[in-house]
Image (tube, rainbow, N blue to C red):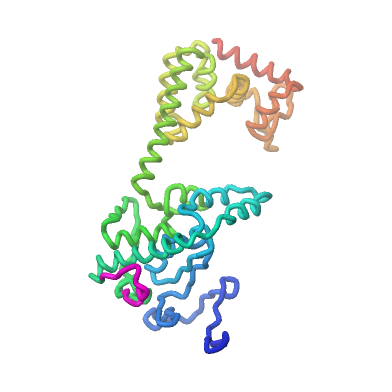
């Protein structure tokens, strides 16, 4: 690569962004032993030629640690949020949650906080301490994180130490893979996953859920597992509590909710014993009904509880009307009232909104009478 003069005695080489290059396969192949992607800055060698940009959205102290351990170079923005806030997590959430129209205002307000010199030192020490700890455990090499010549004293975790870094890999399958943070190699893998080094492994369950195409695996930390379990338990207990209230005080609403959430809505009539409604809804909330995902089942039930009586009844009428063909789908993709051939909408939500309109009261009355006749048998 051609060197360019920077000024004085300084010289440099051109670098490229992703927009400057295109990797195209060729018919000729090379043995991996004959190819090197190593590169150097001064006395420092790196095993793959990619620099992580000094951007808050790209590099955090954890990412810098993991990137370095994998043989690359990550640059932390010392004028970014990591040197303005002790823990910028809340600020990152504000940025992610901002709308297009006020994004600039949000960014200006967040970045108005002053840079704290003590945080710069803390971030650098955080990165060095992690490397020093692993050097001590794996290579019996004791390094002081405060040493000005720190990086020159690193022996094992050098970016160009391919023999070592080739040992860092992950194999995932149907069975859980347990990583022990007290073991050096496992700790490196955890850092790498948190930095996004493995495309098929998300750094957390929430991270996996937030992606358009969720990875097949995610890092499941104990505290996150407990948090997810607790959230589900609270949701489930709330659903059971609402079920008991309905059983004690509002059996009519429980009847309509059963019709709305249960796939077999026509099994319920006004004569159905209240205990049967309770038992079936109890099983539904537990994930033993039409919805076998326990969390979704509990949420669906509580969402139904929060609906007003009019919406619940109309939804019940629509569900049974579809079953008894009081309303039908036609080849044009729309739903019609069988008796009057009136167009009701393209889907069930459209039909419900159509029937709520006072102008369509006659159709609603007709469907209500037909359903009530069945419900009262």
Q: How many marks?
A: 0
What stretch of residues is rendered in magenta? 142-154
Q: Does the image show residue 82?
A: yes
Give how far across and how far down residue 16 sits, in percent: 56, 76
**Residue 174 screen position, x and y as percent:** 34, 51
* Quadrant in which residue 165 is drawn: bottom left
Quarter of the image containing the C terminus? Answer: top right
Q: Residue furthest left?
A: 140
- The residue sitting at 61% across, 21% down in the picture is 317
Q: Along the line of sight, which residue is nearer the eye, 14 or 103?
A: 103
- Residue 57 is at least partly visible in this image: no
Indicate whether 78 appears above or below 159: above
Q: Is residue 143 magenta?
A: yes
Residue 235 placement (x, y as % from top left): 44, 31
Of helix, strand and loop, which mostly describes the magenta segment?
Answer: loop
Observer-nearest residue: 104 or 316? 104
Q: Residue 238 at x, y = what percent?
A: 44, 26
Q: Is residue 66 left or right of residue 51?
A: left
Q: Nearer the viewer, residue 304 or 274?
A: 304
Q: Residue at x 39, y 80 (%)?
A: 31
Q: Is residue 57 above or below residue 157?
A: above
């Amino acid at each position: 690569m051609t060197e360019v003069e920077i000024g004085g005695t300084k010289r440099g080489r051109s670098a490229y962004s992703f927009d400057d290059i295109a990797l195209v396969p060729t018919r000729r192949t090379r043995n991996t032993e004959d190819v090197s992607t190593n590169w150097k800055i001064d006395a420092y060698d790196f095993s793959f030629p990619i620099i992580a940009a000094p951007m808050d959205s790209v590099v955090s102290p954890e990412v810098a640690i993991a990137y370095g351990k994998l043989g690359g170079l990550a640059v932390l923005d010392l004028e970014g949020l990591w040197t303005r806030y002790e823990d910028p997590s809340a600020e990152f959430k504000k940025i992610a949650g901002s709308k297009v129209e006020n994004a600039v205002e949000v960014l200006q307000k967040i970045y108005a906080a002053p840079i704290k010199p003590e945080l710069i030192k803390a971030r650098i020490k955080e990165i060095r301490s992690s490397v020093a700890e692993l050097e001590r455990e794996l290579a019996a090499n004791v390094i002081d994180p405060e040493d000005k010549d720190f990086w020159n004293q690193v022996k094992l975790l050098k970016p160009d130490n391919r023999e070592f870094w080739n040992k860092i890999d992950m194999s995932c399958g149907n069975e859980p893979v347990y990583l022990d943070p007290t073991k050096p190699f496992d700790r490196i893998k955890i850092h790498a996953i948190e930095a996004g080094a493995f495309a098929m492994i998300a750094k957390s369950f929430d991270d996996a859920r937030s992606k358009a195409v969720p990875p097949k695996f995610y890092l499941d930390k104990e505290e996150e597992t407990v948090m997810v379990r607790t959230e589900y338990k609270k949701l489930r207990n709330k659903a059971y509590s609402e079920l008991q209230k309905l059983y004690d005080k509002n059996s009519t609403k429980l009847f309509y909710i059963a019709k709305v959430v249960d796939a077999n809505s026509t099994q319920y009539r006004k004569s159905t014993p209240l205990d049967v409604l309770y038992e079936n809804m109890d099983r539904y909330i537990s994930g033993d009904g039409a919805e076998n995902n326990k969390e979704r089942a509990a949420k669906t039930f509580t969402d139904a509880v929060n609906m007003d009586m009019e919406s619940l009844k109309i939804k019940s009428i629509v569900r049974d009307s579809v079953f008894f063909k009081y309303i039908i789908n036609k080849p044009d993709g729309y739903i019609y009232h069988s008796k009057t051939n009136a167009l009701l909408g393209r889907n069930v939500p459209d039909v419900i909104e159509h029937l709520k309109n006072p102008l369509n009261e006659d159709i609603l009355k007709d469907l209500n009478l037909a359903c009530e006749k069945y419900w009262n048998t």
